[in-house]
Image (cartoon, rainbow, N blue to C red):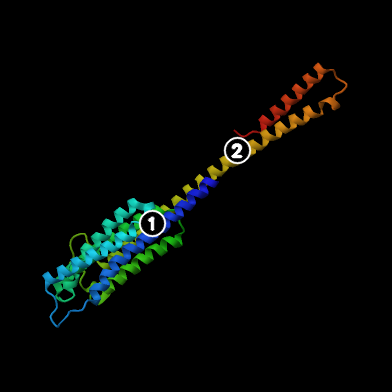
């Protein structure tokens, strides 16, 4: 039980680090989006495409340095940190050109942006499903909260980065690259993914309960067997201690034979009660 408690404590610490990592990944992308939204030009002439690219590159390096400084302390999930770092940097890289697009307003650009954003939504869903799958079993409410949080984050990101937000995106998601869903189709896929996670969770709960029952059954049997063996030893010791007075009418050899017979009967009875 102590060992199981230790594993639970370690698991809780890993979950805390996973939560911290998700927050870091969200913050670095959020910070870039806010920088794009709040960027102000020095004069009435907005930066051209080349200037925007240079400004974005400098901002990327600044955000990556800040991210790596904090992520290096998450030592229990180093492999996940490496994976999420790549995903997060890919998400940042996908936003190259956002500063320039802030100053451009044509349909072709917006359609391309819609495609990239929806592709990111699909990738985010895949990542979320993988993360939640790794955390199973959990309550159905927790699964719902994870998926709802993801949808809210994406919706907020779209509201921040696409003209007129989700409503505007819906106007530019008709001409998308093959395999890229519209926003409404994406939401349908989120519902399907959540339903699938619920099924996997039910199976995980069943397996976890079965494993716990087996572990506790083995532990309890061991405890009962230990108690039986201890009781047998104590009874045999009591018989020997009382033998001199209890069987004073027998000579030493007869008394020894009787004690051996009684001790064997106690041992046989105790053995019959042991659960192998």
Between 57 and 146, the one nearer to me in the picture: 57
Task: State whether residue 12 is above or below residue 223.
Answer: below
Q: Is residue 22 left or right of residue 102?
A: right
Q: Which residue is mark 1?
A: 132
Q: Residues within 10 Å of mark 2 (few under 14, many from 20)?
A: some
Residue 72 image point, x, y percent: 33, 56
In the image, residue 255 sits, relative to residue 165, either above or below, namely above
Return the residue nearer the eye: 46 or 137: 46
Asked if residue 142 shows in the view, the reply is yes
**Residue 42, relative to residue 260: is it above or below?**
below
Which quadrant of the view contains residue 29? bottom left
Q: Quadrant of residue 132?
A: bottom left
Which residue corresponds to mark 2? Answer: 222
Identify the secondary structure beneath mark 2: helix
Position of 86 with respect to 212 (left or right) is left
Query: Is residue 168 visible in the rendered structure shown here?
Result: no
């Amino acid at each position: 039980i102590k060992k199981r408690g230790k594993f639970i404590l370690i698991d809780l610490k890993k979950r805390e680090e996973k939560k911290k990592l998700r927050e870091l990944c969200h913050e670095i992308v959020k910070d870039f989006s806010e920088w794009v939204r709040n960027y102000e030009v020095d004069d009435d002439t907005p930066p051209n495409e080349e200037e925007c690219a240079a400004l974005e590159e400098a901002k990327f390096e600044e955000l990556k340095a800040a991210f790596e400084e904090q992520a290096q302390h998450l030592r229990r999930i180093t492999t996940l940190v490496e994976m999420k770092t790549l995903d997060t940097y890919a998400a940042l890289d996908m936003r190259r050109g956002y500063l320039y697009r802030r100053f451009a307003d044509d349909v072709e650009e917006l359609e391309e942006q819609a495609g990239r954003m929806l592709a990111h939504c699909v990738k985010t869903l895949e990542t979320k499903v993988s993360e939640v799958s790794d955390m199973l079993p959990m309550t159905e409410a927790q699964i719902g909260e994870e998926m709802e949080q993801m949808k809210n984050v994406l919706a907020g990101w779209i509201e921040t980065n696409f003209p007129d937000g989700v409503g505007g995106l819906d106007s530019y998601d008709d001409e998308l690259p093959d395999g890229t869903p519209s926003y409404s189709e994406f939401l349908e896929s989120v519902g399907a993914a959540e339903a699938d996670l619920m099924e996997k969770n039910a199976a995980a709960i069943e397996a976890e309960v079965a494993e716990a029952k087996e572990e506790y059954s083995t532990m309890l049997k061991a405890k009962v067997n230990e108690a039986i063996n201890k009781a047998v030893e104590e009874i045999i010791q009591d018989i020997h201690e009382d033998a001199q007075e209890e069987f004073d009418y027998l000579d030493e050899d007869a008394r020894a034979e009787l004690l051996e017979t009684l001790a064997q009967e106690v041992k046989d009875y105790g053995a019959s009660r042991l659960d192998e």
